[in-house]
Amino acid sequence: MKVKGGNEIAKHISNRALAKTGKLTEKDPLPKNDLRKNTGTTVVNLSQRSKEVLKAQQVIKSTTNVRAEKVQAIKERIGEGSYQIDHDKIAEKMLKSLS
């Protein structure tokens, strides 16, 4: 994953850190020997877990409308009095989730 403007972000973070130590004010540029100054971009490597979380977020985001439509349909059936609860099916799923 590439972060655009990474050089500016790195510069800002470095300046803030140095300002806290009293070695540099927040307005000063990066020191000339700072290697980040010439890279132009910052590369961020995500862990496998982070990639899985990102994928899960994308899936959730893409299925939000489907769930909203399902919830709306159930609300309408409840309002009409036609929604029937299958107690056996619920109990079966609860027991299955425990095993």
Image (tube, rainbow, N blue to C red):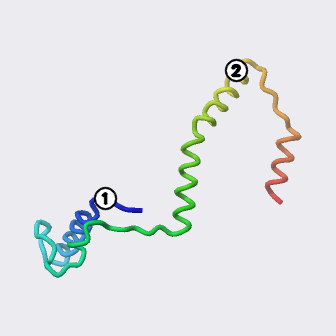
Q: Position of residue 64 (x, y in %)?
A: 58, 39
Give the SS element for disc 1.
loop
Mark 1 in CB contact with mark 2 (< 8 angstroms): no
Residue sitting at x 86%, y 38%: 87
- Above or below — where is 74 with respect to 67? above
State which mark lies toward you, 1 or 2.
Answer: 1
Crowdedness of circle 1 by 10 Å Cα count: few (<14), some, many (20+)?
A: few
Question: What SS does tag 2 mark?
Answer: helix
**Residue 31, how many percent across, how many down?**
14, 77
In the image, taking residue 16 as reference, residue 3 lies left or right, namely right
Q: Which residue is mark 2?
A: 79
Q: Which mark is residue 4?
A: 1
The answer to which of marks 1 and 2 sits earlier in the sequence is 1
Residue that protrudes farthest toward the top in the picture: 80
Q: Quadrant of residue 32?
A: bottom left
- Tell me residue 97's x, y (percent): 79, 54
Is 19 on the left or on the right of 44, as rendered?
left
Q: Which mark is residue 25?
A: none
Q: Residue at x 82, y 42 (%)?
A: 90
Q: Residues within 10 Å of mark 2 (few under 14, many from 20)?
A: few
Q: Is residue 60 above or below residue 22?
A: above
Name the amino acid type tagged 1: Lys
